[in-house]
Amino acid sequence: MKKNDKSSLAAAAAAGPKRHRAPRWLRMLWRSKTGLIGFVIVTVVLVFAVFAPWIAPYDPNAINPVDMLKPPAFMEGGDMRYLLGTDNLGHDIFSRIVYGARISMLIGVCSVVVAGFIGTLFGLLAGYYGGILDAIIMRITDAFHAIPRTLLALVAVSVVSGGSVTTLIVVIGITGWITYARLIRSEVLSLKEREFVKAAITIGTPDRTIILRHILPNVFSSFIVVSTLAVATSILAESSLSFLGLGINPPNISWGGMLSTGRNYLATNWWVATMPGIALTLTVLGIMFLGNWLRDLLDPYNQGLQ
Amino acid sequence: MEMQQQTQRKEVLLEVDHLNTYIKTEDRVLQPVRDVSFQVRKGELLGIVGESGCGKSMTSLSIMGLTPKNITVQANHLLLGGKELTKLSRRELREMRGKEMAMIFQEPLTSLNPLFTIGYQLTETIRLHNQVTKKQAWERAVEMLKHVEIPRPEHVMKEYPNALSGGMRQRVMIAIALANRPSLLIADEPTTALDVTIQAQILYLMKQLMKQYDTAIMLITHDLGVVAEVADYVLVMYAGQVVEEASVYDLFRRPLHPYTRGLMNSTIKVHQSEEKLDTIEGTVPSLADMPAGCRFNPRCPFATAACRDKEPPLAEVLPGRKVRCIRWNELGGEGHGEQ
Amino acid sequence: MARYLVKRVLQMIPVLLIITLVVFLLVNVAGDPTVNMLPLDATEADRQALREALGLNRPLYVQYLDFLGDAVTGNFGESYRYNQPAVELALQRIPASVQLAGTALLLAIVLAIPLGILSAMFANSPLDLAVSGISVLGRAMPNFWVGILLILLFAVELNVLPVSGSGTPAHLVLPAVTLAIQAASQIIPLIRSNMLAIMHEDYIRTARSKGLREAGVVCIHAFKNALVPVVTVVALEIPSLIGGSLITETVFAWPGLGQFLIQAINNQDMSVVQVCILLIAVITLVANLLADIVYCLIDPRIRYS
């Protein structure tokens, strides 16, 4: 119950609203600092991933025994040629990070496509048809939930004995579908109670049409938000597998693998592990920020304020 | 007649003088309550009537000091029993709550904490404001439950809210509110969420307890029927402002403001069943988009250019009667109370 | 409530069946169990003979039923590497894992509950920004990387804690903190958003209207309600905590089930892998069941429905 700014508040209440020109998403991006940071980081990582050969100053796999374990350029004893230093084989760490972005993004995005496809399919079946099908699918998701995802992926990669990019995409995708199945199922269940879907069912619209026309478009926004965050989780999963030596094999480069190498040089050459660690953290952070911003943007309850 | 009503009124308990509330949003400041002034007298039941969004709930929360954080409350005076609420520290105001002034809410289903027993929630308020032992508080709580006519009070004390019906929960809320014999009870739509038969019981109970405990009640409702039933004095609010103030007798005998008349016409009367139900055209203006001049003018069938031009003042046009309308005298011919 | 719990227990049966099926299919169909049982120069005939001896040429469903029967009696065969029953080997490793994961979970809960409540009470304050920032960072960093940073700081730079290994309580600190950071980072934002939502509930307004001080409103009325979903969340975090401990145990050479399992995967010691996965799954399911029981105990609404 302050009295101080009485006149100013009353005056402001009497005045009309301010005018905006920029589109809403751009205004929200500008206002949400984390969203902006996320947007910038993801853009940079995507540029790295797509244009790696043009951005990386060196062949990331070029072994250079003369320049082994050079510290980053900004440190004492650093070499201007190697921005982030070199590792035990004289690889340029910056070049490897640029190429590592490629693997992270490729596996992150593609495995989410796989997970999204399987999960949406099962979620739709469970939610729309219900009954015994729903019970079976839900028990399967329970089963998958009871086994840690990393573990399942590790075993799967090890039994097919190979860390090819395709294997990792499929394995990480298959182990990530339950999030989607549960999300889509619950969305479908609530949509089925809505008038427009009930009406469509009543007038005998074929299931296929109801699903394509009424249900899928309405789960789209939560699908996008979940997918963004799932890309972050998939990148983390890939890095964990590669760190344990069961992920990406050379000559492909993974940040997780680089961290695993760097672990042996912690006492003397901290940058070998730290640089890819920072790259990984920033990328995942950026994707999470972008995902949170998208969630706020697409949230219908959030259209007015924020 | 009007003079008589005025002189009968008792000592002032609550004085609200020029109460304003502001909400800061993204790009502007909104004002849900605008220059609201009124009094509640000892032992009197003041009804505040209006449609949802007219600022009546915000007014009551402002008095209690329970407005959300993003709302700024300003007032020349908020005097309760001679204490200036605007000048109290947060702690002093907190100590007034539950002791000097108490509140019950619209939703009995959600107003009680689902994870605590009725006994805990009732003794909590007793122990908070009185130096009593657990046992004494418990006995007093059981006594309170008896007063609000809850059967098997000892048993109910040990129950969780989910075991009780809506009407029972509202009785518990009343017991909590009256436990420390406050001088003012604010009831925000206390019967709206209840079945009609239960509504009447709760209103009757409140009226009865009011006399027993010598408590004044500020009853907030959208239902003129409820007001006619129990109120002594009535405040009609529209779009954040008081538009009419009168004793319940005067108001129903002769409503002065076109809005009050509209509200009365849209309430179904038994002997009117074959006629069409009048409604007020249009909807309540949104806070962000208040009309210029009289705030009721876009919906008022009698609005003139002057109404659109300048905001009318709340004027005491007859003894003890205030109205915010420049044409009240021209329109006031046919009273609805006599229909 | 009893009926609900019985239903939950009965639901575990098909879930366990599906888990055994997944494990069976992974090992016997996706992979080849004989791959490491023979010397590298073994001929196709040798391989065929081994398959015959192990019963791998029988129809899949017969093999699965066989596997299931063995699983029920606790017989998962021998580790080819250690020549000991796989179950015994796995069970030996459990105490160390429980010690690590239990310490971590306790630490996470002790950290997350006050921090989550404080950042909700002072939403958008510098404190909230710091807490939320750290928990976002915790979620963005894989736990092996958190572990490496902790080693770098406390073992290499400050030299106050051992890099890895086990034996003394000091050895437990870094791996437990690593896991706790991971779990707390997941729990904090949930407590924060729960608290924020609860602070808008009608019963909070009622508590305030009684004249309760804000600390009482938060710590008594809001907290108990915020705790209800936290129980579920903590239970849901258990698989990822166990998943995290696989890697953390490897990073810190902690002699638990996780490290043992990773070694077994690397050695293609499939009977050990099967046992470990099933053990982990059962632990997870039991933990979720316990969470449900706790949930029923603190929320009377469940008891009435």
Image (spheres, rainbow, N blue to C red):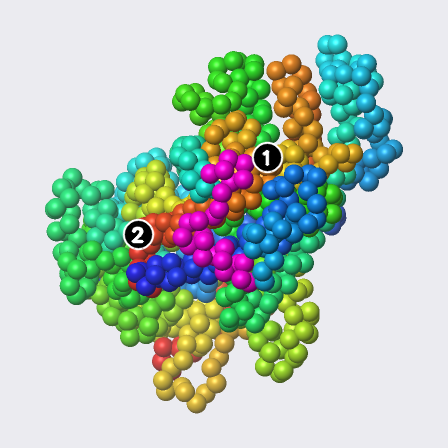
Asked if residue A28 lies left or right of residue A85, the reply is: left
Amino acid bearing label 2: Leu
Q: Position of residue B160 (x, y in %)?
A: 27, 57
- Outermost residue on the bottom side: it is B274
Residue located beneath label 2 in the image = C297
Instruction: Name the front one of labels 1 and 2.
Output: 1
Q: Quadrant of the N terminus of chain B?
A: bottom left
- Residue B268 part of the magenta segment: no
- The kind of secondary structure element at disc 2 is helix
Work out whether residue A293 or residue B216 is closer to the camera in this orientation and state it. A293
Task: Tell me if residue C81 is in the magenta stretch.
Answer: yes
Q: Is residue A269 above or below residue C61?
A: above
**The image quarter in which residue B233 lies:** bottom left
Residue at the image point whose x is 34% and y is 35% from the top: B89
Q: Which residue is mark 1?
A: C142
User: In this view of the protein, which residue sits in the foreground, B137 or A216?
Assistant: A216
* Mark 1 residue crowding within 10 angstroms, few (<14) / some (14–19) / many (20+): many
Observer able to see residue B125: yes
